[in-house]
């Protein structure tokens, strides 16, 4: 099938992260996807394999480099002349209520119109099950007489599931200690087995100062090293600002020379910060797989943290009306449903503090090895979630259903 997927790039790039992953997954399954974006610059680091050239079939500048995916400029869809040959595909996805260009919607008026799907944001709240699949007739404008349907990702069989490529679990299972060490060393992190690794990907309002201060206070000079990997952007900015006020903490530059396993190392403090460059999506997965604890933000990275199977802390996107607190609680209720009460309370306290919804805890739950209760119960929740059919499989079925 041919899919047209429309996405507007919001301030923190999460919408684009979801849409690129969706388009790539469809392409890997043999579908053709035109991904219409209003700002393709984010793909320079998210999907650096994309290169731009004139498309003789469409008569437009398009980006290619990912199997089955053609990236198109949103502005071209807004300004299609009547004589242009472009025809909407079999399925049109309006990601996160982005409002399709009128000129494109007008072309959807045909005897058998394309399936029009409004892909919604992820939530664990109860309304998702009630709203998933509901129709929404269009009464006005160029789409009058057409119908769109709502598709809600989620965590139960009555929702649209989560993005998970068919080969993801096999790739994750192959990520062993040598692969982990090689990846970390390639990125300038002189990690050795037995040392803790934590990643931070956060918004500008994250209480990273409190976390790093607590970590610094909890380690001694002779403690195993704790590596804190700071994602490009807010995490690196906040982490390096904290470091400038704590000169006893060492930084390993992101392009440090490769370290030979077992080689002597200079004396450094037991807490080390490592700012990272912006990572393509595949490399971001490798980051999550290489860490014992991941702090993630927004929708796309949160789902990837679930599939990584490692303890994680989610910073939800803050909303002015405060409803993000309910969304966070709903997810914690679902994710930690079968956890022992003391562990659930301890992890919940950290999650709420990280989101500015509670006081900072006196200590962190144990996280530095796969044998901790947090790690074990995270893996149990991960395994339970794998019983759910993935989003793309469900979406393909959804658009081929009669009615």
Image (tube, rainbow, N blue to C red):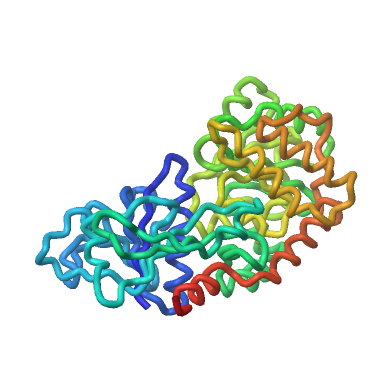
Quadrant of the snapshot with the N terminus = bottom left
Which is more toward the observer, 364 or 4? 4
Vertical arrangement, residue 45 with respect to residue 89, above or below: above
Which is more toward the observer, 348 or 222? 348
Which is more toward the observer, 202 or 114? 114
Q: Residue at x 41, y 58 (%)?
A: 47
Q: Does the rendering let one see residue 351?
A: yes
Residue 292 placed where, x, y %? 73, 51
Q: Residue at x 56, y 40 (%)?
A: 317
* Quadrant assignment, res 114: bottom left
* Quadrant assignment, res 109: bottom left
Which is more toward the observer, 23 or 152? 152
Residue 33 placed where, x, y %? 36, 69
133 relative to 373 in the view: left or right:
left
Vertical arrangement, residue 247 with respect to residue 309, above or below: above
Q: Residue furthest left?
A: 83
Q: Does the rendering let one see residue 236?
A: no
Q: Residue at x 60, y 56 (%)?
A: 128
The count of marks equals 0
Q: Residue at x 59, y 63 (%)?
A: 162
Residue 201 placed where, x, y %? 59, 42
Vertical arrangement, residue 19 with respect to residue 218, above or below: below
Residue 160 placed where, x, y %? 57, 65
Quadrant of the snapshot with the C terminus = bottom left
Q: Residue furthest top?
A: 245
Vertical arrangement, residue 288 with respect to residue 25, above or below: above
* Quadrant assignment, res 62: bottom left
């Amino acid at each position: 099938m041919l899919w047209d997927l429309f996405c507007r790039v919001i301030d923190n790039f999460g919408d684009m992260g979801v849409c690129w992953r969706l388009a790539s997954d469809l392409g890997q399954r043999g579908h053709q996807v035109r991904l219409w974006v209003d700002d393709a610059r984010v793909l320079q680091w998210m999907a650096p394999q994309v290169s731009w050239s004139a498309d003789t079939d469409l008569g437009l500048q398009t980006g290619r480099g990912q199997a089955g995916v053609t990236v198109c400029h949103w502005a071209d869809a807004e300004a299609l002349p009547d004589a242009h040959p472009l025809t909407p595909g079999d399925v049109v996805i309006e990601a996160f209520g982005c409002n399709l260009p009128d000129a494109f919607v007008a072309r959807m008026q045909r005897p058998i119109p394309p399936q029009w799907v409004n892909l919604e944001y992820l939530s664990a709240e109860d309304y998702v099950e009630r709203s998933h699949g509901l129709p929404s007739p269009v009464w006005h404008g160029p789409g009058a007489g057409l119908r769109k349907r709502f598709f809600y990702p989620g965590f139960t069989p009555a929702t649209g599931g989560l993005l998970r490529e068919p080969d993801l679990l096999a790739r994750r299972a192959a990520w062993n200690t040598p692969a982990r060490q090689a990846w970390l060393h390639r990125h300038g992190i002189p990690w050795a087995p037995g040392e803790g690794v934590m990643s931070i990907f956060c918004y500008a309002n994250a209480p990273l100062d409190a976390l790093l201060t607590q970590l610094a206070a909890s380690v001694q000079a002779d403690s195993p090293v704790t590596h804190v990997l700071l994602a490009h952007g807010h995490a690196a900015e906040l982490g390096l600002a904290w470091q400038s006020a704590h000169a006893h903490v060492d930084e390993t530059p992101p392009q440090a020379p490769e370290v030979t396993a077992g080689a002597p190392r200079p004396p450094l403090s037991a807490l080390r910060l490592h700012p990272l460059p912006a990572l393509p999506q595949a490399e971001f997965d490798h980051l999550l797989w290489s860490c014992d604890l991941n702090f993630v933000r927004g929708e796309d990275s949160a789902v990837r943290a679930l599939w990584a199977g490692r303890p994680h802390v989610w910073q939800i996107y803050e909303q002015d009306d405060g409803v993000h607190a309910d969304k966070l609680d709903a997810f914690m209720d679902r994710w930690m449903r079968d956890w022992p009460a003391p562990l659930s309370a301890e992890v919940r306290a950290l999650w709420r503090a990280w989101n500015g919804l509670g006081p900072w805890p006196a200590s962190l739950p144990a996280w530095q090895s796969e044998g901790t209760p947090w790690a074990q119960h995270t893996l149990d929740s991960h395994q339970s979630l794998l019983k759910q059919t993935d989003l793309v499989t469900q979406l393909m079925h959804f658009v081929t259903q009669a009615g």
